[in-house]
Image (cartoon, rainbow, N blue to C red):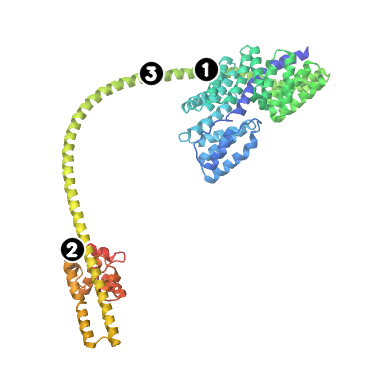
Amino acid sequence: MVYKTLFCYLCSMKNAFFIYLCIFLLHQSVYGGNPYRWEPIETSFDSLGKQLEQINYKSNERMQFYPLVTRMYQIANLKKNTNLQVRAMYWDAWLQFETNTEETEKLIEKALEKVDSIKYSYDYARINFVKGMLLAKHNNYPQAFRTFKKQENYFKAINDLYSLGYTYVNIGSIMRRIGEYQEGNKYYLQATEIFKKGGFIEDEIKNRHNIGVSQYHLGDPQKAVEMLTTLLDDKITQEDLPFRTDVLTSLYFVSQTLPDKEKYAREAYKTAQQITNKTSQTYTLINMGALYIYKNEKDSALFYFQKARHSAEANKDAYSAIHTLYGLAEIYDRKDLPDSAYQYLKRYLQYKEETTGFAKSNEINRYEMKMAIEQYENELLEASERIQMHKKITIISILIGLVVCCVIGYIFWLSRKKEKIAKLLKESENRELNERLQRQQLQNEKYQMEINLKNRELTSNSMIAIEKNQMLRGLLKQIEELEEKKKLPINESRTLKQHIKSHLDTEDEWMSFKHHFEEVHPNFFKKLCAAHPNLSENELRLCAYVRIGMEAKQIAQMLSVLPETINTSRYRIRKKMQLAQDVVLENYLREI
């Protein structure tokens, strides 16, 4: 019967669908919950990267987050930072992976040209990860395999379990694409262990879909059904409608009875209406159409296959288009519309030719892949042998080095012993020298303390003299007031004045001050006169007062003049000494 032929054909195509579905699942889930490992560059840019890294794409609507990438480009261009531009290209390519493969390839190639693979090795690894997925998408499996194996080593080295897990998923999908189902399942199981180890529960659960489908390819459809039905009841599958749709679609293909197929096809179709992913929707439409052909309900079958065709063409999905064209040809033939049946059959044959070519290419790729794996394993073996040889050479070198080191060590010990003796002698000399210096320093400090003490005594004596003079002048003023008021006889007043004025003789005070000053600062006047012979006696006297730290007001009281007069004298002294403006007179006199 014709419908049985169609049904068998659709069943024969499910291997290709499984492969496509698993790769699709991989693309929609990668890096949905990976911890942020990118090297920080710019705070606002990094915050956008963290948002993209943590987003869980349950809706499969990646492009709704494209404004974040647009903002990344703006920041990168504003900062004129090449590394930021590379990251913006990566996220741009990642978002467009499903919708615009050509643009994704351009962005990834450009990013690989600009990325600093040494300083930003993680950026380089992530870009190459997408490069590997592109190679797999274009059926270049050997190169994709090598790319992912390199990423495997890198992610192991940095302990990035999330990326390592999805690297294994990618390699497993490649193995299944070339028919190496056992190897593919092995990598899926490795991914499961890694996800468990890293605590990525949702990713481990979703990977069970890959393992379940692998059981079908390994000849155990019953186990495949059991695993997928168990997965269907999981909370994550129930909440993630796109993923649930794909699990239901897989159950449709692996189920062995028509009632089960119809059950899962209808449920998948119903669930697909609640999501926006066109690929999943198209396959649910094809499944429904195939069921109605099997039931010989031509109008219903035509309805679903036409919807599937429009969806496949709009989504540029060649895999789905092949199914829809053959189904439509069969339906129109059963409806006795040969012209329409012929047109769809013609288009189907064109697509089938391409499919046959793909199958041949897949066989070539499978052979090349096996060769690549063997070559890679040989390289690993050679690398292991080189490592072993290197270890042996290293051990021998270490032994020789130890002997040489012992000889050199003995010579060095003798040399060090001599140096130690010389060092002890030197230290002894240094200690003795330090002790002498310390004694000298103590003497200098003691001498300085004595000088400071005598300076304070001089200043104190000067202040006492100032207070005495002020008091005597006050007495003179009181005597004059009493004399004016006729309260004190003139003779007695004159006697008192002469007696008081005799004690106001500043010249005697100056000579006493000068005597004590020269005891504290010997040769001060001699050195000052030698340096500046044009200074007068009064100016020398003023310099001495300044030298012991007396202020202008105190000196004025000492000399019975106004403070302005002292400032004028200071200016005249600076001019005679020809001192620069930045030289302080007090500091200059202290150095004499």
What residue lies at 22% left-to-right and 60% top-to-bottom? 452
Front of the two marks 3 and 2: 2
Badge 1 amino acid: Met
Front of the two marks 1 and 2: 2
Residues at marks 1 and 2, CA–CA distance in whole angstroms: 102 Å
Front of the two marks 1 and 3: 3
Q: Which callout, 1 or 2, points at the residue further toward the start of the chain?
A: 1
Query: Badge 2 is on which residue?
Result: 520
On screen, 332 above or below 524?
above
What residue lies at 36% left-to-right and 20% top-to-bottom? 391
Q: Which quadrant would residue 219 be assigned to in this image?
A: top right
Badge 2 amino acid: Val
Report crowding for label 3: few under 14, some 14 to 19, many 20 or more residues within 10 A (C-alpha): few
Q: Which quadrant would residue 426 be assigned to in this image?
A: top left
Report crowding for label 2: few under 14, some 14 to 19, many 20 or more residues within 10 A (C-alpha): some
| Total marks placed | 3
Quarter of the figure that contains the N terminus: top right
Q: Which quadrant would residue 410 be assigned to in this image?
A: top left
Badge 3 amino acid: Gln
In the rendering, at what x and y percent does residue 375 appear?
Answer: 49, 18
Secondary element at image label 2: helix
Residues at marks 1 and 3, CA–CA distance in whole angstroms: 25 Å
Query: Badge 1 is on which residue?
Result: 371
Pick out the residue farthest to the right: 336
Residues at marks 3 and 2, CA–CA distance in whole angstroms: 85 Å
Task: Tell me whether the residue at label 1 lies in contact with that at label 3, contact meaning CB atoms closer than 8 angstroms.
Answer: no
Q: Which callout, 3 or 2, points at the residue further toward the start of the chain?
A: 3
Secondary element at image label 3: helix
Q: Is residue 376 left or right of residue 556?
A: right
Which numbered tag is attached to residue 388?
A: 3
